[in-house]
Image (cartoon, grey):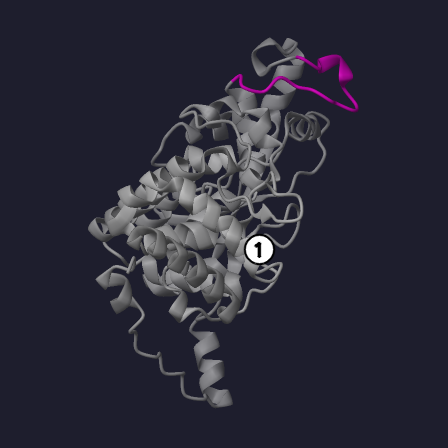
Amino acid sequence: MSMLIEETKMWKTTKVESKAKLSDAEINDRYSRGEGRIVVENNREKLHGFVQQLSDDQYMDLRPFYQRRPRWDPVRQSRLIESFLINLPVPPVFLYERDFNSYEVMDGQQRITAIKDFYDGKLALTGLQYWPELDGRYYHNLPKTVKAGIDRRSISSIVMLKESAPEDEEALLLREIVFERLNTGGVALERQEIRNALFQGQFNETIMDLSHHNTIRKAWKLPLFDPEESAKNDPKLVKSSFYQKMEDAELVLRFFALRNVDHYKKGMQGFLDLYMLKATRLDKNIVQKLKTQFLLVMDTVEAIFGDVAFQPYLPASDEFLGRPQKAFFDAVTVGIARNLDDIQILIDRKDRILELTKELFRNNEEGTFTGRGNTKADIKQRIDLYSDMLASVAAE
């Protein structure tokens, strides 16, 4: 069994009792005390001074942009700068005051990143509509008057103050509500991006770290991991919907969560939310054990499947699909995790595993391993079939 004892325990939680029904008078009293209302302040700051403050990690750590991956390409970033240049209104950013003069960004990551990249000399203007003469220019080599004009512009911010929710749990709830409602416009957040935003901690950091694994990168045809890739803004990553939507991170979460498939409920996305919530409370030693298990499974996948990792087999053409599928990723990885004690035997008998993998696709209904069904029974079936096949190979 691949589940840890601590994971088994985390499902045994007591139900939270619902609040008693309040009378109108009690509701009015609660509202008068300010409960359930956020306290905000509005600020404006010159761009140049704002960027200078960003260099102070205590002021605004860039990682609490909830680690959302950049989605704006250089053209869109440049047009934001052009908007400042021609004095078009730019929507305010929304910040959460986590401590005195220390903030997290709840909405506005892309705008702040574009401004910082421009002032840091990482963005060459391109695709400008009103000022095409400035295409190719960086902040440092703008004409003197134009540079002064940019420096005069301001960015507005709305700050959700700590007074909104003094208690940590209440603050988390309010942040969740604000975050989800703020991000209903623009480029909509995917579910994994929201999880990444709301469930900060050791477990989330581990998921983000493991999402870089090159077995996943190669299977989904992404560039091999480069520790400096965020700074380089690799165009292959910027253009990859799979990467931008954090689907690689969601794969890692699927592996951890579906090892607990007996507790599956609320549909796939709801179950991933539930597991993430519970696993966030695991201590760092348990998270390290989970990480070690994931790495061992990935090494085994690489050794057995190589270039066809996570690709379904097509009996009609006697070939692998040529691209991976998430449902088969689930079956393979959780199946291997259930047979951790026999890893070396499985690797030694990889040809047999490939042969029996093809048999599974021949002998089961089309779609069994490709996610056509996503009920609890469907998911358990494909994981059990693959796990049992691996166990039979180890027992031969």
Rendering coords of residue 172 (x, y %): 40, 60
Kindly identify the residue that appears in the image at 23 percent across and 62 percent down.
6
Q: Is residue 25 magenta?
A: no
Position of 232 relative to 222 (above/below) = above
Q: Is residue 134 magenta?
A: yes
Q: Is residue 145 left or right of residue 337?
A: right
| Residue that numbered label 1 is attached to | 362
Q: Is residue 194 visible?
A: yes
The residue sitting at the left extreme is 285
Characterize the magenta stretch by its predominant secondary structure.
loop
**Which of these two is toward me, 259 or 188?**
259
Q: Which residues are magenta?
A: 121-136
Quadrant assignment, res 30: bottom left
Position of 192 relative to 112 (above/below) = below
Position of 356 relative to 308 (above/below) = below
Q: Is residue 231 left or right of residue 12?
A: right
Q: Is residue 301 visible?
A: no
Rendering coords of residue 102 (x, y %): 37, 42
Q: Is residue 58 left or right of residue 75?
A: left
**Which of these two is toward me, 57 or 263?**
263
**Which of these two is toward me, 186 or 151?**
186
Rendering coords of residue 361 (x, y %): 55, 54
Q: Is residue 11 left or right of residue 141?
A: left
